[in-house]
Image (tube, helix red, strand yellow):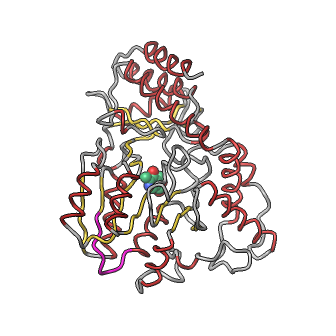
């Protein structure tokens, strides 16, 4: 084996965490300032403002001091009160998982669950809202990463807003890699983070919070306060005049600041375009090699992750181990229900570059060939290159 497990891989093509941009790594090495030094307080305020610009928010976002699972759990704990009826939309492992958190804070849980290679149908949401006027909170995962599929959150958000319910959106693995923002989908709490498409390490949550969500959280006596799970504690922390409830993750803020600069300076539209093109080249190449995509239709396939269905008779774990061992290329497995059934090729942040589709197809096809499942890698590369060159 050329690349044993105790050496670093050559190329990490995962669906998060991803290798950080080199500039972000340099940012992480900035001085760790004292949090009440005025220079840090000013820096923190400016970074929140960059985050606000990137998220295209009319309100100040909140930054929580832990990777985005913290933000998801905090959203459930803060927004969902014991009397709420929650409609959870589950088209995959993360969507389903949110329902377990929701249930901790209110026993009244309704769910729409699809097959994990499909997307939520807005008509089903409309029907459910009509049948259950008591629904007060709706939760949806935008890109259910372990399936590589996208839900129509802007359509769903319009329905939820018309119903008058609150909307919680998990956009952790889509924000920054495609055209999605909290106000586009009328989210009340929109959860994302630096460790997927923004190309920074895991360690922070970025939250978009609507004015009515602040009101609801403040009225909820059960919402965490003086707690790592609290959103309320951080409401005014963005201001250089206000205290922090606890010490912010100074080094992670340094990294996020650079990641936001890179995103805003490159131009969000350009960033989304290279994510979409890399994903398209990967999908077209995979199909040309005779492989099947996991997504039931290409229209719901994610621009930030391509999930390839594992060919029959192939052990998915061996496939990834072979790609890593022979070529030094790392892919993501499925999770939970999709584990063993698909491999995920990530196109996030620094690896959302079309040429990485060629490396991915080559390593994936090479691993299959090594395991005795013959595919024509050349056909895949030709097809992917045609997509890339047509866009040049
Ligand atoms: C990555 C991700 C998160 C954060 O969760 P981890 O599993 O801890 O990385 C949450 N939601 C989605 C959809 C994600 O892709």
Residue 312's spot in the image, x, y percent?
26, 28
Residue 46's spot in the image, x, y percent?
73, 63
Residue 256's spot in the image, x, y percent?
66, 56
Task: Count every numbered label the image shows and give the total.
Answer: 0
Q: Residue furthest front?
A: 162
Please indicate whether residue 96 sits to the left or right of residue 240 in the image.
left
Quarter of the view holding residue 390: top right
The residue drawn where x is 49% and y is 65% is 71
Residue 328 vs 6, above or below: the answer is: above
The residue drawn where x is 32% and y is 39% is 340
Q: Residue furthest bottom?
A: 221
Residue 172 vs 289, above or below: the answer is: below
* Closer-to-camera residue (49/133): 133
Residue 24 vs 98, above or below: the answer is: above
Residue 326 within the magenta-colored segment of the rendering: no
Residue 386 vs 14, above or below: the answer is: above
| Quadrant where the C terminus is found in the figure | top right
Question: What segment is highlighted magenta in the picture?
Answer: 80-87
Helix, strand or loop: magenta stretch: loop
* Closer-to-camera residue (216/93): 216
Quarter of the view holding residue 270: top right
Residue 9's spot in the image, x, y percent?
58, 35
Residue 82 within the magenta-colored segment of the rendering: yes
Please indicate whether residue 126 sits to the left or right of residue 170 in the image.
left
């Amino acid at each position: 084996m050329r690349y044993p497990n105790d050496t670093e891989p050559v190329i990490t093509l995962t669906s998060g965490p991803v290798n950080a941009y080199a500039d972000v790594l340099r940012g992480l090495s900035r001085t760790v300032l004292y949090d009440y030094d005025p220079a840090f307080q000013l820096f923190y305020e400016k970074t929140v403002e960059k985050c606000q610009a990137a998220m295209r928010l009319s309100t100040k976002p909140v930054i929580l001091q832990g990777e985005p699972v913290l933000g998801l759990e905090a959203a459930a704990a803060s927004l969902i009160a014991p009397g709420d009826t929650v409609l959870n939309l589950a088209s995959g492992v993360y969507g389903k998982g949110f329902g377990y958190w929701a249930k901790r804070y209110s026993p009244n849980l309704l769910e729409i669950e699809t097959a994990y290679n499909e997307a939520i149908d807005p008509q089903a949401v409309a029907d459910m809202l009509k049948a259950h006027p008591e629904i007060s909170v709706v939760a949806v995962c935008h890109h259910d990463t372990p399936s590589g599929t996208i839900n129509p959150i802007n359509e769903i958000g319009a329905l939820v807003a018309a119903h008058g319910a609150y909307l919680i959106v998990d956009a952790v693995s889509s924000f920054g890699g495609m055209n999605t923002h909290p106000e586009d989908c009328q989210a009340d709490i929109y959860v994302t983070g630096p460790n997927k498409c923004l190309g920074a390490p895991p360690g922070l949550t970025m939250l978009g919070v609507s004015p009515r969500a602040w009101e609801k959280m403040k009225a909820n006596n059960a919402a965490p306060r003086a707690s790592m799970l609290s959103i309320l504690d951080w409401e005014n922390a963005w201001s250089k005049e206000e205290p922090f409830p606890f010490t912010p993750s100074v080094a992670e803020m340094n990294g996020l600041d650079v990641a936001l600069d890179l995103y805003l300076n490159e131009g969000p539209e350009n960033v989304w375009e290279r994510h979409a093109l890399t994903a398209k080249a990967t999908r077209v190449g995979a199909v040309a090699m005779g492989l099947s995509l996991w997504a039931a239709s290409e229209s719901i396939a994610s621009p930030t992750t391509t999930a390839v269905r594992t060919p029959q008779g192939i052990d998915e774990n061996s496939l990834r181990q072979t790609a890593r061992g022979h070529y030094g290329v790392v892919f993501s497995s499925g999770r939970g229900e999709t584990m063993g059934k698909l491999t995920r090729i990530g196109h996030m942040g620094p690896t959302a570059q079309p040429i990485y589709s060629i490396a991915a197809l080559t390593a994936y096809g090479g691993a299959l060939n090594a395991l005795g499942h013959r595919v024509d890698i050349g056909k895949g590369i030709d097809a992917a290159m045609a997509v890339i060159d047509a866009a040049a």
